[in-house]
Image (cartoon, grey):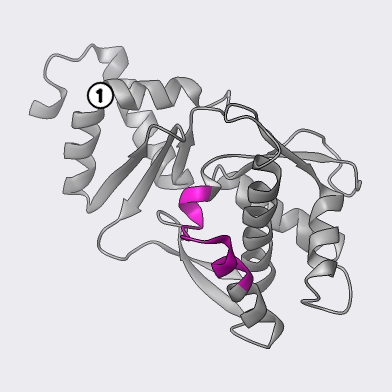
Amino acid sequence: MEIFEGMLQRDKDEFTRICNRLLSQCFVCKKNETTRADYYFIMKYKEKFLEYLSVLGYRLDINEEYGVVQLVNTQNYNRYNMKLFESIILLILRILYDEKKRELSISDEVIINMGDIHEKFMSLKIRDKMIDKTTLRNAISTMRRFQLVEPLDRDLSNEDARLIIYDSILMAVRVEDIRSVYEKLDHYRKGGRTNEEIDSSEID
């Protein structure tokens, strides 16, 4: 293919691997140690990625300020049907990110613990009881798959278990004002939709 003209074979192999990563994970974050090299590779061959993925019906949203690359399906395919509590936890993570970020410098990582999620869930009075541990653990696993969070501790049933929330959360939940997130949560509290379709290549 002309798009690979002039590329070394090892770079062609990396290009293929990273395209597959984008298709399965949606985001690539510079602050994530496991994907940092992939982020810089994408930036190096940005035009080639844009050209190749556009043929498949995708575009890349690149935010250099956040250090995040997001794959977006322009044909409205590949939608992930997010469960109710996944949607709620995603929005709670966005609120916690905003609250913690105000306490930090621009370059600092946003780290919360599982207790923060439980506390915010109960304070919002979305349900009368706490989220059960299995549901929360599964939701965090989904968020990790999409490069939104990264557990720092193995046992997520522990209230003190820590999570990094990546800047990709800002692209996953794109709101002009954090009040919009609270409005969505209020919708759930009042008995809104029980599940929400989320594009696995555009979680917004």
Residue plotted at (54% across, 69% down): 180
* Label 1: few (<14), some (14–19) or many (≥20) C-alpha neighbours in 10 Å: few
Residue tagged 1:
45
**How many callouts does the rendering have?**
1
Residue 89 in the image, given as x and y percentages of width and height: 68, 61
What is the magenta range? 170-182
**SS category of the residue bearing label 1:** loop
In which quadrant of the rendered view does residue 139 lie? bottom right
- Would residue 1 be seen by someone viewing this image from the given angle? no
Q: Which quadrant does the N terminus fall into?
A: top left
Residue that extends furthest to the bottom in the rendered view of this protein: 191
Residue 27 in the image, given as x and y percentages of width and height: 46, 42
State whether residue 135 is above or below residue 15: below
In which quadrant of the rendered view does residue 126 lie? bottom right
Is 171 within the magenta? yes
Q: Is residue 37 left or right of residue 77?
A: right
Residue plotted at (39% across, 45% down): 23
In which quadrant of the rendered view does residue 62 lie? top left
State whether residue 147 is above or below residue 44: below
Q: Is residue 166 left or right of residue 103?
A: left
Dominant secondary structure, magenta: helix
